[in-house]
Image (cartoon, rainbow, N blue to C red):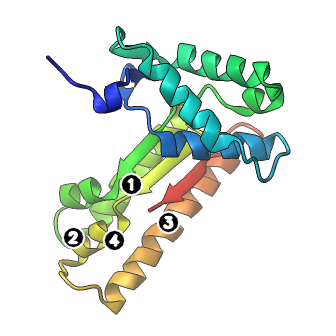
Amino acid sequence: MIAFRDDLPLIVLEDRSAVAFDSGWFTRALNVAAQRAGYPQWWLAPHIAGSVQAWLKTLAERTSLPVKLFMRAVREALKVIGYEKIGKCFEDAAPLARISLVELAQGAGNGFELAFFAALNRKLSEVLQRGGSYCELHGLHHAVKVLRQQRIWSRDCAALRSEIVTFARDHTIRACNAGPQGRELFLHVA
């Protein structure tokens, strides 16, 4: 028997990869959609995320759920409670793009920053090509220590951390400006 995290079905993306539902991501994605729809501080986002998570638990017989069906259900739920405008802003993009900076650092090898930045560039480009609107880069602190081959945080680590954040933001801005008009990617670095 296979147990899924929180007993929720996996969400199958357009490229046939699957991701687990993440309530934190979903709350942030709803807030981004609400901001685009003109609601700068939308207090309902965590409550909607909890409701969607509860709905997904009712699908116990399903092990996966196509992203289009998931997105349509979210839009319909928002429409029913009077927030159709937010539902329209909730894009049919990959529901969660997560890039592990630690994996990229380990793949690049200790001290090989150029290989790390090349791999990060490729990963960010893939997210944009898939039409993603939200991307989370995680493991920044540990990735910097791997690249610097440090156990204790140092000034060099802080400088590299800043370089990585700047690189990711600059890459995203350039790619969005070069793409279709109105293209956005919300980038969260943790």
Q: Label 4, label 2: how many angstroms apart (C-alpha)?
A: 9 Å
| Residue type, mark 4 in image | His
**Residue on which disc 2 sits:** 146
Q: Are marks 3 and 1 in contact (CB under 8 Å)?
A: yes
**Where in the figure is residue 96, as x and y percent of width and height?**
48, 37
Q: Residue at x 61, y 50 (%)?
A: 186
Residue wearing tag 3: 167
Which residue is identified by label 1?
A: 120
Say what amino acid the circle numbered 2 marks. Val
State how far apart marks 4 and 1 are (Cα).
Answer: 15 Å
Compare marks 4 and 3 and give the one earlier in the sequence: 4
Q: Which amino acid, by three-letter code, is at mark 3?
A: Phe
Residue located 42% across and 13% down the image? 59
Please identify, in this view, whether the residue under mark 4 or under mark 3 is nearer the observer.
4
Q: Is residue 1 above or below residue 42?
A: above
Tell which circle, 3 or 2, labels the residue nearer the N-terminal end: 2
Spatial CA span between label 3 and label 1? 9 Å
Image depth: mark 3 or mark 2 in front: 2
Distance Cα–Cα, label 2 vs label 1: 15 Å
Q: Which mark is residue 141?
A: 4
Taking the spot 38% from the left edge, 19% from the top edge, the residue there is 16
